[in-house]
C-alpha cells in the first residue's frame, strides 16, 4: 500500500471512529439532563422558564463536545492537511 | 463538496475576493437595518399601530425580558449588543428558507468574529460596571491560585462559542447535502425544517451564553454560596 492510500484509509476510519465514539458520551449525558429536567418540570411546573433556560444552556455545553468531534472528522475527510501535503509531494515528484 | 459559504466565490479581482460569506452577511445586514428603519419611521403610542410595530415590540421586549432573567441588573444597557447578536444569528438561520442562500454563520470567520465581539465586550462592560480594579479582581476569585484557570477559561469559552455555532450551522447544511445524494425527495425537507429549529436554538444559546458571561463579569462580588457560572 502506498502512502496516499494509507493516509486516505486511516483518515476515513478515524473520522468514523471519532464521530461514533465522540457522540456516545454527549448522547448519554443529554439523555440524563433532559430526563432530570423533565422530572423537575413535572414537580415544579411554575419554574418552567428557569428550568428550560438552564436546560438549553447546559445542553449547548454538552453538545459542544460532540460538535468538536464532528468538526474534527469533517476536517479529516474534507480538509485533511496530511492528504493535501501528500498530494502536493506526489505532484512535485511527478513533475520532476 | 464545499465546506461553507467561504468557497462560494461571486467575484474576484486581484486580492479582493467577494465570497458567499461577505455577500450574504451584507444582504442580511441590509435587510435587518432597512426593515428596522422602515418600521420605526412611523411609530405610534396609541392603540392604533401597524402590525410590524407590534412584531418589533414583541421581539424587543422579549429579548429585554430574557436578558433580565439571566441576572443582568439593567437589561436596557445590554439590549443593543445582545439583541443584535441574537437577531443576526437568528436571521442567518431563518433565511435558509430562501433558495440559493447559505447561512454566513456556517463559515468559521463569521462565528469567530461574533465570538471575538463577546470576548471584547465582556471586559468593557465589566470595567464600566465595577471599575478597572474591581473587574481585574474578579480574576482572583475565589483565590489567586485560580488566576491561570480563569484566564484559560476566558479563552476557551470564546473558542467554544465560535466552534459551537460554526459546527451546528455547518452540520445542518452538510447533512442536507449528504441526504440529497442518498434519499433525494422527502427526507432533506424534514432535515431542513429541523435545521431551522436548531438554528433558532443556537441563536438563543449564543446570546444567552454571552449574557451569562456579561452577568458574571458585571456582578459586583460573588457571594460564597453562589454557584459558579458555567464554562465549557
Image (cartoon, coloured by chain):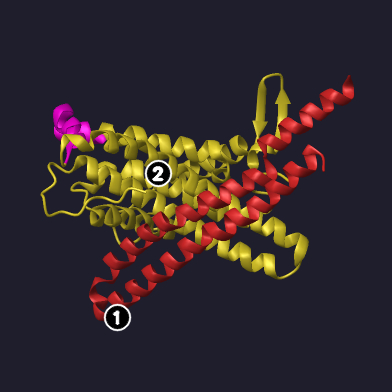
Chain colours: A red, B yellow
**Vertical side of B221 occupied by B65: above or below:** below
Quarter of the image where one finds residue A17: bottom right
Q: Residue at x 46, y 42 (%)?
A: B162
Residue at 54%, 36% in the rendered image: B109
**Tags 1 and 2 on a common chain:** no
Query: Percent position (x, y) of residue B47?
Result: 31, 62
Which of the two residues, B196 or B109, is positioned nearer the viewer here?
Answer: B109
| Percent coordinates x, y for residue B42 in the rendering | 39, 48
Q: Which residues are magenta?
A: B125-141
SS at mark 1?
helix
Does the stretch in magenta take in B19?
no
Residue B35 showing in the rendered view:
no
Q: Quadrant of residue B221?
A: top left
Asked which secondary structure carries label 2, the reply is helix
Q: Which mark is residue B183?
A: none
Q: Chain of mark 1?
A: A
- Label 1 sits on residue: A42
| Residue A93 horizontal side relative to residue B210, left or right | right
Q: How many marks?
A: 2
Q: Magenta stretch mostly in which secondary structure?
A: helix
Chain letter of disc 2 in the image: B
Residue B82 visible in this rendered orientation of the protein: yes
Residue at mark 1 to residue at mark 2: CA–CA distance: 35 Å
B1 relative position to A27: left or right: right
Quadrant of the image occupied by residue B178: bottom right
How packed mark 1 is, by other alpha carbons closer than 10 Å (few <14, some 14-19, many 20 or more), is few
* Residue A85 locus on image (x, y percent): 72, 30
Identify which residue, A86 or B131, lies in the foreground: A86
Q: Is residue B127 magenta?
A: yes
With respect to residue A67, does B185 lie above or below? below
At a point 61% along the width and 49% down the height, the residue shown is A73
Q: Which residue is mark 2?
A: B84
Amino acid at each position: 500500500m502506498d502512502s496516499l492510500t494509507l493516509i486516505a484509509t486511516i483518515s476515513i476510519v478515524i473520522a468514523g471512529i471519532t464521530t461514533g465514539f465522540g457522540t456516545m458520551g454527549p448522547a448519554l449525558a443529554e439523555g440524563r439532563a433532559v430526563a432530570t429536567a423533565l422530572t423537575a418540570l413535572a414537580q415544579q411546573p411554575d419554574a418552567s422558564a428557569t428550568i428550560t433556560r438552564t436546560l438549553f444552556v447546559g445542553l449547548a455545553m454538552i453538545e459542544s463536545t460532540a460538535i468538536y468531534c464532528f468538526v474534527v472528522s469533517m476536517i479529516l475527510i474534507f480538509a485533511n492537511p496530511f492528504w493535501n501535503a501528500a498530494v502536493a509531494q506526489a505532484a512535485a515528484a511527478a513533475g520532476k | 463538496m464545499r465546506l461553507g459559504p467561504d468557497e462560494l466565490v461571486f467575484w474576484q479581482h486581484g486580492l479582493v475576493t467577494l465570497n458567499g460569506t461577505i455577500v450574504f452577511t451584507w444582504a442580511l445586514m441590509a435587510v435587518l437595518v432597512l426593515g428596522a428603519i422602515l418600521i420605526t419611521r412611523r411609530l405610534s403610542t396609541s392603540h392604533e399601530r401597524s402590525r410590524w410595530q407590534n412584531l418589533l415590540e414583541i421581539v424587543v421586549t422579549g429579548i429585554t425580558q430574557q436578558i433580565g432573567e439571566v441576572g443582568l441588573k439593567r437589561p436596557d444597557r445590554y439590549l443593543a449588543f445582545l439583541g443584535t447578536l441574537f437577531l443576526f444569528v437568528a436571521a442567518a438561520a431563518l433565511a435558509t428558507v430562501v433558495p440559493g442562500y447559505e447561512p454566513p454563520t456556517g463559515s468559521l470567520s463569521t462565528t469567530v468574529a461574533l465570538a471575538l465581539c463577546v470576548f471584547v465586550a465582556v471586559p468593557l462592560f465589566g470595567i464600566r460596571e465595577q471599575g478597572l480594579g474591581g473587574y481585574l479582581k474578579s480574576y482572583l476569585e475565589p483565590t489567586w491560585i485560580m488566576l491561570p484557570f480563569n484566564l484559560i477559561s476566558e479563552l476557551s469559552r470564546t473558542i467554544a462559542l465560535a466552534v459551537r455555532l460554526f459546527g451546528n450551522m455547518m452540520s445542518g447544511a452538510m447533512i442536507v447535502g449528504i441526504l440529497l445524494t442518498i434519499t433525494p425527495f422527502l427526507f432533506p425537507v424534514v432535515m431542513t425544517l429541523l435545521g431551522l429549529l436548531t438554528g433558532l436554538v443556537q441563536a438563543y444559546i449564543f446570546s444567552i451564553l454571552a449574557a451569562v458571561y456579561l452577568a458574571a463579569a458585571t456582578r459586583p462580588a460573588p457571594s460564597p454560596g453562589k454557584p459558579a457560572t458555567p464554562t465549557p
